[in-house]
Image (tube, rainbow, N blue to C red):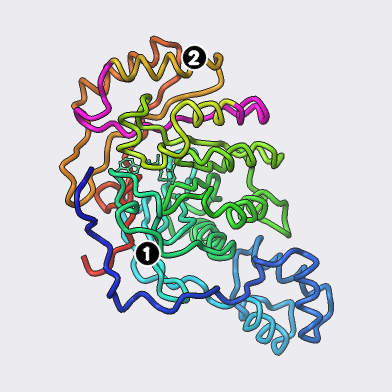
Amino acid sequence: MTGTPVRLDLSSPSRGPRGKPPRHFVDLTPDERVAAVTALGEKPFRAKQLATHYFTHLTADAAAMTDLPAASRDRLVEDLFPQLLTNVRTQTADGGTTVKTLWHLFDHAKVESVLMRYANRTTLCISSQAGCGLACAFCATGQMGLTRNLSTAEIVEQVREAARALQAGEVPGGPTRLSNVVFMGMGEPLANYKAIMATVRTLVAPAPDGLGMSARNVTVSTVGMVPAMRKLADEGIPVTLALSLHAPDDELRSELVPVNTRWNVDEAIDAAHHYFEVTGRRVSIEYALIRDVNDHAWRADLLGEKLNARGKGWVHCNPIPLNPVPNSRWTASDPRVEAEFVARLRAHGIPTTVRDTRGSDIDGACGQLAAEEDE
Ligand code: SAH
């Protein structure tokens, strides 16, 4: 374990009153949007115009909605598009192609999102909760504890803002689209199931009611909340599922990932395999490689055996070199040890790709998001 939590400060003045964020257009169903618009004395078709501005033009700025009468758009935007996210800091790396943004929410809870532009895709890593209650030993967010779940609109707003920045050409490389979204920022998405499912539906809904993304390009990463994984399988939306395993044996996993005492290694792998069976989508197994903690060759072999025991071709592995978090004595594996771990998995026939550590120099890589200000 990493010892004392370092970033939990209950006296912080930035912790505002608890409560729900104000109502936002994104939180409403298409029918509710029409009802909300007519309740403001506007014609029903205004709902569709607003949806087009939001999801296609990626704007919630009244001034940009020139096809609506000025008085109407001011009233509609004020009522239906309250500002949910306030950008308090942007940090960049990799020549501006990695962008980490710290957001304040309406109650001053804080979250981060990280945009990464690659040659052939753009990936946004989003937060689903402020903080996280699952206390994984090696994760900076886990050391903060949970502040609260985000609403659907608070999650979707992270995506809209990144898509807008890309469309506007603000990220070096020319204007482009957002192609991928991963729930690998702060929080455990399956612990905020309703809001993340509504987010997923919004991301994949065709215009004008959503962003029209491909479900396979949306990745839900979970610590292994087994009942929710099974429920996700039945939603009929083939998102990519990633399971954060980090150890193939219960003794070590319970130390690294405390929720393992509730749903153990075999139950988590079974649920991941069930997801593949139902959706046909190959599941990712995430495995942060921690020097001398979980990087032993025998653990690679045990992992390969456990995955193969469920079948072939249903899974691939993503070892992640541990990203350092403050006050931890743990560090990434020796490169030779990492190479051996990967080779063992491949020898078992498990496709294996080491995750890059983009953003680690701005504390924007996996497990480093702690939404700290004034560092
Ligand atoms: N709660 C979700 C999302 C967490 S972040 C989950 O558990 O899957 C995405 C991935 O980063 C997870 O696999 C998480 O275990 C991993 N991670 C956390 N801290 C890390 C660190 N310090 N270095 C590398 N990966 C880390």
Determine whether the residue tagged by mark 1 lies in a helix, strand or loop.
Answer: strand
Determine whether the residue tagged by mark 2 lies in a helix, strand or loop.
Answer: helix
Q: How would you rate the neighbour count of disc 2 (Cα within 10 Å): few for under 14, some for 14-19, many for 20 or more?
A: some
Residue 130 quadrant: bottom left
Q: Residue 90, image x and y in percent?
A: 34, 64
Q: Earlier in the sequence, mark 1 or mark 2?
A: 1
On whether ligand 1 comes within 8 Å of the CB at mark 2, the answer is no
Q: Is residue 352 magenta?
A: no
Q: Which mark is residue 308?
A: 2
Label 1, on which residue? 102
Instruction: Give the residue type that dot 1 points to.
Output: Leu
Decide: is 217 above or below 125: above
> The N terminus appears in which quarter of the rendering?
top left
Instruction: Give the residue type that dot 2 points to.
Output: Asn
The residue at the point 53 percent across, 76 percent down is: 83
Q: Residue 65, image x and y in percent?
A: 67, 76
The residue at the point 49 percent across, 45 percent down is: 182
Residue 292 quadrant: top left
> The C terminus appears in which quarter of the rendering?
bottom left
Q: Which mark is residue 31?
A: none
Determine the CA span between mark 1 and mark 2.
Answer: 41 Å
Magenta region: 274-297
Q: Is residue 162 left or right of residue 52?
A: left
Camera-side residue of 168 and 72: 72
Camera-side residue of 334 and 269: 269
